[in-house]
Image (spheres, rainbow, N blue to C red):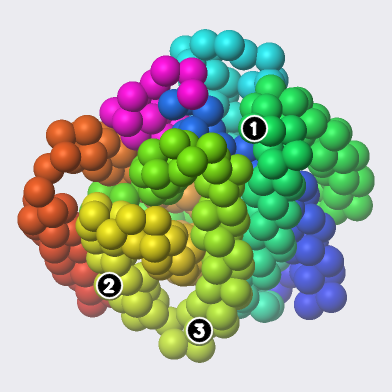
Amino acid sequence: MGNTFFTSRNAYFTIILLGIVSLMGDIVYEGSRGIIPDYLKFLGASALIVGLVGGLGEFLGYAIRLISGILADNTRAYWIFIFIGYGLIVSVPLLGFTNTWELAVILVLVERFGKALRSPSRDTIISIVSKGLGAGKAFGIHELLDQVGAVIGPLLVALLMFYSYNNYQLTFSFLLLPFLILLIILYYTYRKIGSKTIAESKIEDNLKKKLGKPFFFYTLAVTFNTIGLIPIALILYKASIILQPLNQQWMVPLIYLLIQGVDAPAALLSGYAYDKFGAKILLIPFILSIFPSFFSMYDGGLIALITAAAFFGIILGMQESIYRAAVSKYATISTRGTAYGIFNTAYGLGFLISGGFYGILIDLKAPLIYTILLIIFMQTIAVVMLLSSQKIHK
């Protein structure tokens, strides 16, 4: 059954508008994430705390999507979730008014909670309008625009940190400006396409189906893949250990900038590849996930951490495009919010476990062999589950 409003032209328009909204959001929260590990360390947090906060933040950012996704499917209140979710990004500029790591942690988690509220509804809308374009292409374009903000944000923060002589409070407070611009663009987007996306979501109400085994096998595959992958926060944490004695903390956001810069083209190219070659393209990021963890835990100094960041950027781009696109392969529109919620809950659980595992390994200065064993075990299970999901899916 075809769409009535979202022709190819309108579909591109919708995806670009949502991409610009995400772009502005990323300037704020992705810009801040490059210095949050170092800021928590500055406030007195240990590596374990930073790792767990990063993992817990990602877990909340995904786990709450289970509830918001189900509610979105049942209420069609996609835009309410989107507005509240983006509104909570205000917690990032508020970090500029904190002086304890405990309060900073709360604000970091609030921002992640907001992401959990908006993401299933936003992804469902993108999947609705992508039928004539290809899910891989649609999510790839959205992620490309998203990552433009993710590049501008860390660059802006690095400049602010450099010219303010590492003034965290001033840097965070300045991010209130792009947040206000975000709200204006989001309101414009809603006025243009809000009612039409709701109408389109009702077209396939008669196609309700339950989520089957292939979806859950795929979700487990991504979970194990994530558990074996060191979190961004700990790559940056290790970099800050090296750079802080040199009073060069402003370089930490530049490493995060590298991750986001590599992410953008990886997302777009992998999206097109997914539409052409199918879900088997997912084997590439699963295999590449070996390298960020190895180079981060290998005692190779700043060069090794930069190498880990580059590999992580490639994987992140694929996660944000083709991992999300593949969900639409296993779920009809009427169950897609729920599917994205379940998928992202498991995805976030992987980040939580990963943050704890690697945080402990760093604090204990564990031998590299433990990292290697963890990587091989988790990624082997992930590949087996991925192949199983594709084999039983019809």
Q: Is the Cβ of the residue at disc 2 closer than 8 Å to that at disc 3?
A: no
Whole-percent x and y of residue 308?
Answer: 37, 61
Task: Give the magenta-colored segment's residue range.
Answer: 42-58
Judge by depth and name the residue closer to the eye, 367 or 31: 367
What is the CA distance from the residue labelled 2 to the residue labelled 3?
Answer: 17 Å
Write down the residue under mark 2: 287
Q: Earlier in the sequence, mark 2 or mark 3?
A: 3
Residue for point 22% across, 33% down: 363
Whole-percent x and y of residue 264?
Answer: 61, 67
Say what secondary structure mark 2 lies in: helix
The residue carrying pointer 3 sits among few (fewer than 14), some (14 to 19) or many (20 or more) residues within 10 Å by Cα, namely: some
Identify the amino acid type marked 1: Asn
What is the CA distance from the residue labelled 1 to the residue labelled 2?
Answer: 37 Å
What's the magenta bit mostly, secondary-structure-wise? helix
Identify the amino acid type marked 3: Ala
Write down the residue under mark 1: 166
Whole-percent x and y of residue 182?
Answer: 82, 41
